[in-house]
């Protein structure tokens, strides 16, 4: 099949597709020129990450499309039901990047707990007097061990986060839409496994009230999941990480909560406005920021590329 990878594809994915007899174009076609490019090149498979938007107008304008592949998890940039209604297959790679995103959550937690984001900003610019302030900021630093972590969402990423939290010696609480008990397994290098039973809750207030750290690992929600009302339910001094989607936390309420001393620090990998977030976020010293990099590791992108290739090669058989 003729494939356009518009947001890039790993070498491993490229190799697997080409060895599977597929024809791959690796271009970065601007959104407004995409329909023309697809039609002129008779593209049958469009591969995207989160940057390219695959909305109804593009789907309608491109009758040659047979498969839309999302290299990653969130499909909020694709009109999935609409495409499927027109007979187009829509696929993604739901678990390939779970570990990478979970590690990003902890990269941010460790950075927040030791105020590394603050020291990164101050070190190169400030002289000795400010360096003392910097040291004072270190005295606010905390360990993760023994603290209570709240995890919203218990899919692939949430589960990886919980496993890592257990290894850090944290107390873990999980919020899901329906309370349930699920077991997760910690695997060690020597092959040993230890199982843990996790009881989730569906009560937001009960969940939020005693957290030291909070991470959100859900798909995009309709409306804010964390807004003024939820910040009021939290204890003072909480650290928050959002690697899920912009719009899950109300960014304005987050800034208010930081200024009120409710939130000690927050890390955002996703924003209401991408790729350029609000200036009020970029300038805020209590925030540690990364530009939507949760799934952006060599390991995750290799797994994503190979999983996409396997699915496309399999699906291509039905179009012969
Ligand atoms: O949904 C995802 O898989 C992540 O948000 C990563 O998005 P990206 O592929 O654009 O980095």
Image (tube, rainbow, N blue to C red):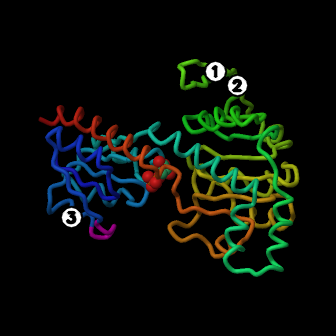
Q: Are marks 3 and 2 in contact (CB under 8 Å)?
A: no
Whole-percent x, y for residue 273 in the image:
56, 67
Q: CA distance from mark 1 to mark 2?
A: 6 Å
Q: From where the camera sits, is residue 76 visible?
A: no
* Label 3 SS: helix
**Main SS category, magenta section:** helix
The earlier-in-sequence mark between 3 and 2 is 3
Residue lying furthest front in this view?
A: 128
Whole-percent x, y for residue 161 in the image:
63, 38
Pick the residue in front: 61 or 257: 257
The earlier-in-sequence mark between 1 and 3 is 3
* Figure quadrant of the C terminus: top left
Residue at the location (80% across, 69% down)? 134
- Establish if 280 lies above or below 138: below
- Establish if 252 lies above or below 235: below
Which mark is in front, 3 or 2?
2
- Establish if 90 lies above or below 112: above
| Mark 3 crowd level (few <14, some 14–19, many ≥20, 10 Å Cα) | some
* Label 2 SS: strand
Q: Quadrant location of residue 310?
A: top left
Whole-percent x, y for residue 188 in the image:
57, 25
Look at the image and say whether residue 311 sits in the magenta stretch. no
Q: Quadrant location of residue 28?
A: bottom left
Disc 1: which residue? 183
| Mark 2 crowd level (few <14, some 14–19, many ≥20, 10 Å Cα) | some
Whole-percent x, y for residue 11 in the image:
29, 49
Q: Are marks 1 and 3 in contact (CB under 8 Å)?
A: no
Disc 2: which residue? 198
Q: Are marks 1 and 2 in contact (CB under 8 Å)?
A: yes
Disc 3: which residue? 37
- The span shown in magenta is 29-33
């Amino acid at each position: 099949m003729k494939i356009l990878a518009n947001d890039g594809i790993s070498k491993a994915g490229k190799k697997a597709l080409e060895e599977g007899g597929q024809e791959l174009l690796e271009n970065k076609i601007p959104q407004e020129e995409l329909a023309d490019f697809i039609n002129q090149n008779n593209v049958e498979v469009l591969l995207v990450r989160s940057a390219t938007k695959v909305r109804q107008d593009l789907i309608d304008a491109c009758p040659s499309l047979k498969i839309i592949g999302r290299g990653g998890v969130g499909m909020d940039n694709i009109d999935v039901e609409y495409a499927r209604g027109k007979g187009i297959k829509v696929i993604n790679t739901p678990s390939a990047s779970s570990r990478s995103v979970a590690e990003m959550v902890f990269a941010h937690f460790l950075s927040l707990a030791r105020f590394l984001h603050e020291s990164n900003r101050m070190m190169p610019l400030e002289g000795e007097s400010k360096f003392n302030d910097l040291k004072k900021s270190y005295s606010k630093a905390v360990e993760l061990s023994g603290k209570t972590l709240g995890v919203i969402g218990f899919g692939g990423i949430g589960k990886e986060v919980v496993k890592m939290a257990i290894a850090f010696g944290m107390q873990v609480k999980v919020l899901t839409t329906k309370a349930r008990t699920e077991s997760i397994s910690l695997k060690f290098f020597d092959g040993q496994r230890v199982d843990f039973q996790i009881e989730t809750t569906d009560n937001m207030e009960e969940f939020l009230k005693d957290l030291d750290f909070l991470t959100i690992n859900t798909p995009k929600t309709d409306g804010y999941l964390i807004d003024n009302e939820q910040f009021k339910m939290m204890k003072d001094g909480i650290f928050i990480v959002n690697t899920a989607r912009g719009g899950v936390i109300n960014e304005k309420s987050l800034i208010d909560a930081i200024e009120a001393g409710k939130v000690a620090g927050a890390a955002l990998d996703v924003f209401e406005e991408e790729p350029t977030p609000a200036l009020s976020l970029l300038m805020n010293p209590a925030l540690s920021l990364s530009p939507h990099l949760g799934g952006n590791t060599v390991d995750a992108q290799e797994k994503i590329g190979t999983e996409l290739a396997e699915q496309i090669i399999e699906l291509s058989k039905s179009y012969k």
